Image (tube, grey):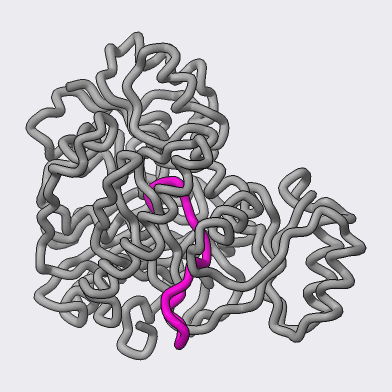
Amino acid sequence: MRVMVVGGGAREHTLAWKLRSSSKVEQLYVAPGNAGTGAIAQNLDVSPTDIQSLASAAREHRIDLTVVGPEAPLAAGIVDFFQKEGLRIFGPTQAATRIESSKVFAKGLMQKYGIPCARGQVFSSRSEAVDYVRSRPAPIVIKADGLAAGKGVTVASSQQEALEALDNLMQKKVLGAAGEKVVIEERLTGKEVSLLAFTDGESVCPMVPACDYKPVFDGNRGPNTGGMGSYSPPAFFGQREVEEVKHTILEPAVRGMAQEGAPYIGVLYAGLMVTSDGVKVLEFNARFGDPETQVILPQLKTDLVDLMLATIEGRLGGAKMEWSDRPCVGVVMASGGYPGRYRTGLPITGLDTLDKDILVFHAGTAISGDNLVTSGGRVLTLVASGANLDEARARVYAVLPRVRFEGCHYRTDIAAAGAR
């Protein structure tokens, strides 16, 4: 098979790495990719949101299967376009992607089909939203309706902070159309976990759970990022909890999407909070997570191509997934200043000194002359496995100092006992 991965981050490098291990894959392409994907596949200089050019590339290179990484092309309708063109593609349709691209739609779906989530209401009127916030005790969560690159959620510790978030979204329109409608919710407390699953619109096959870390600094301090690291699986969320979420959250969501006329086919990501009142949904995403994918897929023993084809072709009910019993820990190495302003073009050294079984997934990297250089905020994810989480964690932190670029920073508490 000839396979194309859409996207250019560490998630897409991980997908390409896993697909490359399939005996069914003969040629592999990544659009646009990065320096890491360029070492195992042919990079194509096409933007992930340039759907027509991606379709042209799929025809030109006789692609048998396209795999979409990021949410933006899914929300823009890449799956619908490819299907109309007779091109096989893995991912949900534009209508199904609303489970991520519209917080208002997702909240309505959960409320209609009895999926456990935070209590909340939807507002399109700023004055009504302000009145509601003034009637509620803090903390309060304000969510912009549309895609906002991880910047659409404010967990306000006071009413004043919540009102400022509303002003930014609905009056100043700092996120444009994404903030025209908002969801206002109670704040859930507990332990967060991500559970991803393959679904063909009927059957649901959960993956191993994972936990990620969004704030930039140790102890969950500082501004949120795209994710500074992850580990899998967490001890507090075992097979019993996975089965519970499958039956109470994932399957009802898939049935609900079908009843709404938007069958969900692809990977469904449930961001969960394990509360004292049970497991509840924080958010749904319509694709593989980042950085969770970097610690989930190394544990997958089953051929990823087989699972994707079974998903697309409605054969997932008969599929079986086999997983390694070696946990994984991944740490993101970021540019100085990230998630704020940062420099690029800085030389990266030390990757050739790592142990062979340490996995390196590139995100913001490029080749400049003979040098590997930085080209983004999140630069690399280093992943190690072990007999247990403590061993995996020790192994990845032992090698991180060998990799260097100016201004590099990373969290030192990923998967630490007190941060699990």
Q: Is residue 6 above or below residue 27?
A: below
Tell me the quadrant of the picture where the C terminus can be found. Answer: bottom left
Tell me the quadrant of the picture where the N terminus can be found. Answer: top left
Q: Nearer the viewer, residue 412 or 308?
A: 308
Q: Residue at x 76, y 44 (%)?
A: 177
Q: Which quarter of the figure has residue 246?
A: bottom left
Could you tell whether 78 is left or right of 124 in the image? Answer: left
The answer to whether residue 40 of the structure is visible from this angle is: no
Q: Residue at x 52, y 71 (%)?
A: 216
Residue 394: image location, x then y, percent: 21, 79
Q: Which quarter of the figure has residue 242?
A: bottom left
Q: Nearer the viewer, residue 220 or 173?
A: 173
| Magenta span dominant secondary structure | strand
Could you tell whether 315 is left or right of 121 in the image? Answer: left
Membership of 282 in magenta stretch: yes
The answer to whether residue 222 of the structure is visible from this angle is: yes
Residue 263: image location, x then y, percent: 43, 37
Membership of 281 in magenta stretch: yes
Q: Nearer the viewer, residue 396 or 402?
A: 396
Residue stretch in magenta? 273-289
Q: Nearer the viewer, residue 211 or 317?
A: 317
Could you tell whether 252 is left or right of 322 in the image? Answer: right
Could you tell whether 245 is left or right of 217 in the image? Answer: left
